[in-house]
């Protein structure tokens, strides 16, 4: 009765339970320029602490933007090991990986920007609309990708947990223990996750569902600010009890 009168009881923020500063980066989607800018800001921001720092990338590194291959190269070669980077798998990496073995997913992948990933690896033949040679493109893409890129794609994690923060590309299925979460949900879920108001004391940090401004709620933090078309690549900084955001395009001293 009281809930009907006064509404839902506010959900408190979980106790972080972490002793490192974590930077969690949203969907990059082939925008190497924005990744470079945001990484410069993260490096600068990290100079004011003696605590360990960590970088968690929430997936969707590729597709839509102009330089997916360059993004993967940067993540593999330019991130300082002191950040102990964690790379999660997004739904766009899921489609990319499946395409290499199952070219029949080509129409679905190309329709969501996959063609831009193919082009970034120097492949321009067989891409024409309904007549696209998906089997041929998959074979050429497999050959064009450096071994390190194959290893990166095959080694992506589905989720990462630090204290009471759980990191996943899309989110989690409510009322399902973390250890029983379906990888498909971690990469693809949307409606059921976004409609929930608590996750058993966890705060889920995610991308996947675009927002104009980062969302900071007690039970979830959303940082996909549509970088490929908005020019704003965002990360959340989790520092003890504090949460704040860094985005490209914001005024900052770097």
Image (cartoon, rainbow, N blue to C red):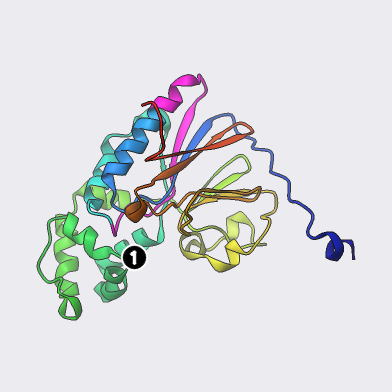
| Residue denoted by label 1 | 95
Percent position (x, y) of residue 35?
32, 42
Whether residue 154 is visible here, answered yes or no, is no
| SS assignment at label 1 | helix
Residue that protrudes farthest toward the left in the picture: 125
Q: Quadrant of residue 117?
A: bottom left
Nearer to us in this view, 19 or 114: 114
The answer to whether any part of residue 93 appears in the image is: yes
Left or right, 54 with respect to 147, comes to right
Q: Is residue 63 magenta?
A: yes
Compared with 126, 75 (above or below) is: above
In the figure, is residue 237 to the left or right of 16? left
Q: Is residue 183 above or below residue 83?
A: below
Residue at image location 43% in from the left, 48% down from the top: 26
Place of residue 216 in the rendered image (x, y in percent of width and height, measured from the top left) = 59, 47
Q: Judge left or right: residue 7 versus residue 31.
A: right
Q: Residue at x 22, y 51 (%)?
A: 67
From this view, report whether residue 158 is shown above or below residue 125: above
Q: Which residue range is magenta in the image?
A: 44-64
Decide which of 59, 66 is in the foreground and name it. 66
């Amino acid at each position: 009765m009281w809930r009907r009168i006064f509404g839902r009881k506010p959900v408190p923020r979980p106790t972080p339970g972490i002793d490192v500063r974590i930077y969690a980066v949203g969907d990059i989607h082939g925008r190497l320029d924005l990744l470079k800018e945001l990484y410069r800001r993260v490096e600068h921001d990290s100079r004011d602490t003696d605590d360990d720092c960590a970088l968690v990338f929430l997936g969707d590194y590729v597709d839509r933007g102009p330089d997916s291959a360059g993004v993967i190269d940067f993540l593999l070669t330019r991130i300082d090991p002191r950040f102990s980077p964690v790379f999660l798998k997004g739904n766009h990496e899921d489609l990319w990986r499946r395409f290499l073995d199952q070219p029949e997913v080509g129409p679905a992948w190309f329709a969501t920007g996959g063609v831009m990933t193919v082009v970034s690896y120097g492949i321009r033949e067989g891409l024409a609309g309904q007549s696209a040679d998906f089997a041929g493109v998959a074979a050429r893409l497999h050959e064009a990708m450096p071994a390190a890129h194959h290893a990166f794609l095959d080694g992506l994690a589905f989720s990462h947990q630090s204290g009471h923060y759980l990191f996943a590309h899309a989110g989690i299925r409510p009322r399902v223990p973390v250890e029983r979460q379906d990888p498909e949900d971690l990469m693809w879920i949307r409606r059921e996750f976004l409609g929930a108001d608590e996750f058993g004391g966890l705060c889920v940090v995610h991308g996947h569902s675009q927002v104009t401004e980062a969302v900071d709620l007690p039970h979830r933090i959303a940082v996909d600010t549509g970088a490929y078309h908005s020019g704003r690549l965002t990360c959340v900084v989790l520092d003890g009890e504090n949460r704040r955001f860094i985005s490209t395009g914001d005024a900052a001293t770097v």
